[in-house]
């Protein structure tokens, strides 16, 4: 004897939950509790569906009996979280020859045959697993319907089932087994579901939306999925009048009437007003903007389901802020509804999601945003294009410091090599320009100025392409783009984030233009100013070359004297733009050879500019060449070997400090020493800087203070943090180089194999993208503990690219760091992420009533 099917009639008081019946079932219960006109619905829980998948055959008499005589139902999947997916919905279960006759009398034979045909095809494909092509050429005529029944019988060697209970049992079994199949399991696991995730099934009376009077079905929402602004959109299929009308107000405020016919408001004004009222009930009751699936039958409205309105990132911000400002949710709740990683869509131009994509290259999405421009293959060509107001995309095998001016001029950058912390990636993020790196499979010929892609197509300099730094794709031709959205809602949300977060967010800003962006994004200050980037302008580069080629310390000092006013002006601009907010300036870091040309033409031009023989220039370049320059004569080592460089920079900082103070801003500059490994290095540089500070105080007759810190980039500096902290005010961890040295990985080359390493589980994440908590993180914690033990008021921070990563910010908060510093366009992401972390760390009684209380069904459109 078969067991009675264990089903639950969904009512206001029914005992069901998302964890046992799935979120669709729970959402329908919420609609019923809000007095929505929902058709009779029952639910099968996870255990029942699992039993069906394993072969248990339940007696469905009572379940179908709850729908009355001649039941006609739909079966929909109800997973615990909608984003996990599920089998396709099956409609019209219970349709058979007998019901065809009775329905034909009520709604007409054409409509009745249409329902029957729809069910036969769905049952044959989804349940019997027949080839869809068998039914491609069939229409809804009487002959078409008979042909469909004959095809089913021929293929299955049995007639199409007429018993509703047999039909329903087969549909339930098919959906249950599909959920537990290998493909479905792997798919939902890729979306974050456990392998044994459960599935509920919802059986609902069909509200056909058919009849002689106004009848139809559709979906409607009252905000735009693209912008979040008030806008009535959707779809309404009017069965009684045989036409499709958009579910939108046919007023000038929205879309006017057109050839598609009248709007829902025209054909069913009372129902339209009822839907508007129901939308407001849902908005306040479920605390969310909802999309309503509905039917009309002789003017009677039925709500079949309601799901969270699908939305772009820009719409998500506006909707969250609007709900908070209208008192539906709290400000904290609004913050938690906006994912930090979705914010780049608002900050940069983006490829229109509806645009066609002809992908010609694919790599790492190193810097978000999109740009269209002509291909160029050199920094000089990029500058020439910019001079003519021609947007261009700079394509290089990899970039070097000498390409910086070209990167400034280009609209976007693509490199064949490199990873997330390569030169191109770091500079592009700082500039806010789209960047794709590590585009394996393409061939770049700098001499021929061509880009050859795997399918054999060749693109030449001047050809139009679109670079999508958000997805890591390069697209052929010009593609439709969407503009950034830094509107009032965005700024309101950012202000709320600042009220909630408990860690500082500074910016890595190397130039006044970077600082302007930082101010626009309300960064708490500058956490890293890489002064070497100030020297690549044409007039300064010439002086740098003179300094590099100087034979004596006196000659170097003379060249640096010419750089002094330029540096002073740079720092003064930074101080003025930041208006009293802290500015941390890292002294000169890179090896000198980075300022020298490598091409024959470049060497010849340099020799001409310096009035030196080409051989002399070549010999000097060779003398400065190092086998491993990133571990060679750079950073503090250069400052000790050539102290006049740091002396000039310190003087420029102090003089700019006093100049700015005269205008009313009290400045306490922060000076950071790069690539320190030993306490003695700090002692030597500190004594020199103190001497410069004393001299400037005497010369100007004014007092000022400054803070000295160390950029911890080497494992030894982390291990010796206690000794180093005794001489410093702060330690800032340069996690790019620290990760590189801890792993023994080149951040410029790791992209070649990093994807494979992550895929095979060698690394859980790219350590240059998300901080390695177990390895590098242990060094940070050790250094923090030893540093604080030596100096209790020590300021701790990170200033690598990890500073904009939400997971890395979480680590810094837990480690008690004062602030993180990141690229300008990652500041909003960091501010929101920090707010999320602070809010989720609150004691349970103080946490905001989050929308998760509604069940995550509201996070999906299905």
Image (spheres, helix red, strand yellow):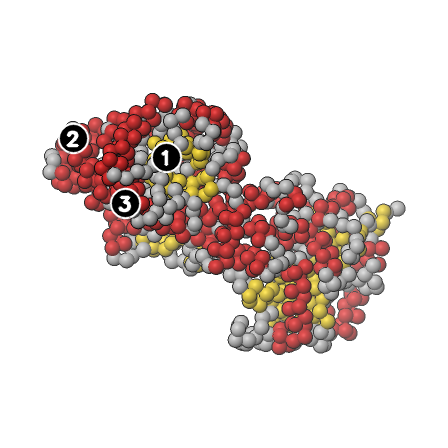
- Name the residue carrying label 1: 707
Which quadrant of the structure image shows residue 703?
top left
Residue placed under numbered mark 3 in the picture: 659
Decide: few, some or many residues near mark 2? Use Cα within 10 Å; few <14, some 14-19, many ≥20: few
- Lower position in the chain sequence, tag 3 or tag 2: 2
The answer for how far apart the CA atoms under marks 3 and 2 are is 27 Å
The residue at the point 36 percent across, 50 percent down is 516
Is label 1 or label 2 in front? 1
> What residue is rendered at 50% in x and 56% in y?
492
Q: Quadrant of residue 842?
A: top right
Which of discs 3 and 2 lies nearer the camera? The answer is 3
**Contact (Cβ within 8 Å) of mark 3 with mark 2:** no
Q: Is residue 697 visible?
A: yes
Q: Secondary structure at mark 1?
A: strand
x and y, in percent, of residue 293 in the image: 66, 63
In this picture, residue 187 sits left or right of residue 455: right
Q: Residue 483's mark?
A: none
Q: Which residue is mark 2?
A: 554
Residue at 63 percent of width and 45 percent of height: 846
Marks 1 & 3, CB-CB < 8 Å contact: no
Looking at the image, residue 96 lies above or below residue 574? below
- Percent from the top left, x then y, of residue 31? 71, 59
**Whole-Å distance between the Cαs marked 1 and 2?**
29 Å
Query: What's the distance in space between the residues labelled 1 and 3, CA to CA?
Result: 18 Å
What is the secondary structure assignment of the residue under circle 2?
helix
User: Would you say the residues marked 1 and 2 are in contact, meaning their CB atoms lie under 8 Å apart?
Assistant: no
Q: Quick one: SS at disc 3? A: helix
Residue drawn at point x = 38 percent, y = 58 percent: 478
Task: Decide which of 85, 276 is in the foreground and name it.
Answer: 276
Sequence-earlier tag: 1 or 3: 3
The C terminus - image quarter: bottom right
């Amino acid at each position: 004897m078969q067991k009675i099917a264990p089903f639950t009639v969904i009512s206001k008081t029914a005992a069901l939950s998302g964890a046992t019946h799935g979120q669709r079932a729970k959402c329908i219960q919420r609609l019923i509790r809000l007095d929505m006109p929902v058709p009779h619905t029952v639910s099968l829980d996870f255990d029942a569906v699992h039993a069906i998948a394993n072969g248990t055959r339940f007696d469905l008499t009572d379940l179908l009996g709850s729908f009355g005589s001649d039941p006609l139902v739909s079966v929909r999947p109800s997973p615990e979280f909608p984003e996990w997916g599920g089998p396709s919905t099956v409609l019209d279960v219970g349709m058979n020859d007998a019901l065809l006759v009775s329905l034909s009398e009520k709604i007409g034979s054409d409509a009745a045959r249409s329902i029957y045909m729809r069910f036969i095809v769905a049952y044959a494909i989804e349940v019997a697993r027949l080839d869809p092509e068998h039914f491609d050429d069939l229409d809804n005529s009487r002959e078409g319907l008979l042909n469909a029944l004959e095809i089913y019988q021929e293929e299955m060697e049995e007639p199409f089932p007429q018993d509703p209970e047999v039909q329903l049992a087969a549909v339930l079994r098919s959906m249950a087994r599909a959920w537990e199949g290998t493909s479905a399991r792997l798919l939902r696991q890729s979306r974050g579901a456990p392998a044994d995730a459960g599935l509920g099934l919802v059986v609902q009376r069909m509200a056909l939306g058919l009849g002689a009077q106004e009848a139809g079905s559709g979906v409607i929402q009252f905000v735009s999925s693209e912008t979040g602004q008030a806008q009535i959109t959707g779809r309404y299929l009017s069965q009684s009048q045989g036409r499709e009308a958009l579910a939108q107000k046919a007023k000038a405020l929205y879309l006017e009437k057109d050839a598609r016919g009248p709007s829902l408001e025209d054909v069913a004004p009372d129902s339209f007003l009822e839907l508007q009222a129901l939308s407001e009930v849902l908005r306040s009751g479920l605390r969310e903007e909802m999309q309503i699936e509905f039917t009309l039958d002789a003017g009677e409205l039925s709500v079949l389901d309601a799901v969270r309105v699908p939305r772009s990132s820009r719409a998500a911000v506006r909707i969250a802020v609007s709900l908070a400002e209208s008192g539906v949710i709290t400000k904290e709740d609004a913050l938690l509804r906006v994912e930090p990683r979705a914010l780049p869509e608002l900050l940069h131009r983006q490829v229109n999601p509806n645009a066609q994509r002809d992908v010609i290259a694919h790599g790492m999405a190193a810097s978000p945003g999109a740009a269209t421009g002509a291909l160029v293959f050199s920094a000089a060509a990029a500058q020439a294009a910019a001079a003519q107001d021609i947007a261009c995309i700079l394509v290089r095998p990899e970039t070097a410091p000498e390409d910086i001016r070209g990167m400034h001029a280009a609209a976007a950058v693509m490199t064949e090599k490199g990873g997330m912390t390569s030169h191109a990636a770091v500079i592009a993020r700082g500039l806010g320009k789209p960047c794709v790196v590590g585009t394996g499979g393409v061939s770049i010929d700098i001499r021929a100025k061509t880009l050859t892609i795997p399918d054999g197509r060749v693109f030449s300099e001047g050809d139009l392409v679109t670079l999508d730094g958000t997805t890591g794709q390069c697209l052929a031709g010009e593609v439709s783009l969407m503009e950034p959205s830094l509107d009032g809602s965005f700024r309101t949300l950012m202000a709320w984030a600042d009220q909630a977060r408990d860690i500082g967010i500074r910016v890595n800003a190397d130039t006044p233009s970077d600082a302007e962006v930082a101010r626009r994004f309300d960064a708490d200050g500058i956490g890293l100013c890489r002064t070497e980037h100030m020297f690549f302008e044409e007039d300064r580069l010439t002086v740098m070359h003179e300094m590099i080629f100087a034979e004596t310390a006196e000659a170097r000092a003379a060249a640096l004297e010419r750089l002094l006013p330029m540096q002073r002006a740079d720092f003064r601009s930074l101080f003025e733009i930041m208006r009293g907010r802290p500015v941390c300036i890292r002294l000169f870091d890179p090896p000198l050879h980075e300022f020298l040309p490598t091409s024959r033409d470049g060497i010849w031009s340099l020799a001409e500019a310096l009035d030196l023989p080409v051989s002399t220039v070549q010999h000097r370049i060779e003398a400065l060449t190092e086998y491993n320059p990133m571990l060679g004569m750079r950073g503090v080592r250069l400052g000790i070997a050539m102290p006049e460089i740091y002396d000039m920079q310190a003087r420029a900082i102090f003089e700019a400090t006093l100049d700015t103070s005269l205008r009313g801003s009290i400045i306490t500059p922060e000076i950071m020493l790069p690539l320190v490994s030993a306490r003695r290095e700090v002692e030597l540089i500190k004594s020199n800087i103190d001497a410069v500070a004393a001299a400037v105080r005497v010369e100007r007759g004014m007092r000022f203070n400054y803070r000295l810190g160390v950029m911890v980039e080497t494992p030894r500096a982390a291990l010796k943090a206690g000794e180093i902290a005794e001489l410093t005010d702060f330690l800032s961890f340069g996690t790019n180089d620290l990760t590189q040295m801890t792993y023994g990985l080149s951040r410029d080359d790791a992209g070649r194999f990093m994807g494979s390493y992550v895929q095979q589980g060698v690394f859980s994440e790219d350590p240059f993208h998300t901080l390695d908590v177990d390895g590098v993180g242990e060094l940070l914690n050790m250094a923090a503990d030893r540093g604080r033990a030596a100096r209790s008021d020590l300021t701790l921070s990170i200033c690598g690219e990890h500073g904009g990563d939400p997971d890395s910010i979480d680590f810094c908060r837990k480690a008690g760091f004062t602030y993180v510093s990141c690229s300008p366009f990652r500041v909003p992401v960091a501010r929101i992420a920090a707010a999320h972390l602070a809010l989720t760390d609150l004691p349970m009684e103080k946490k905001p009533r989050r929308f998760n209380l509604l069940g995550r069904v509201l996070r999906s459109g299905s």
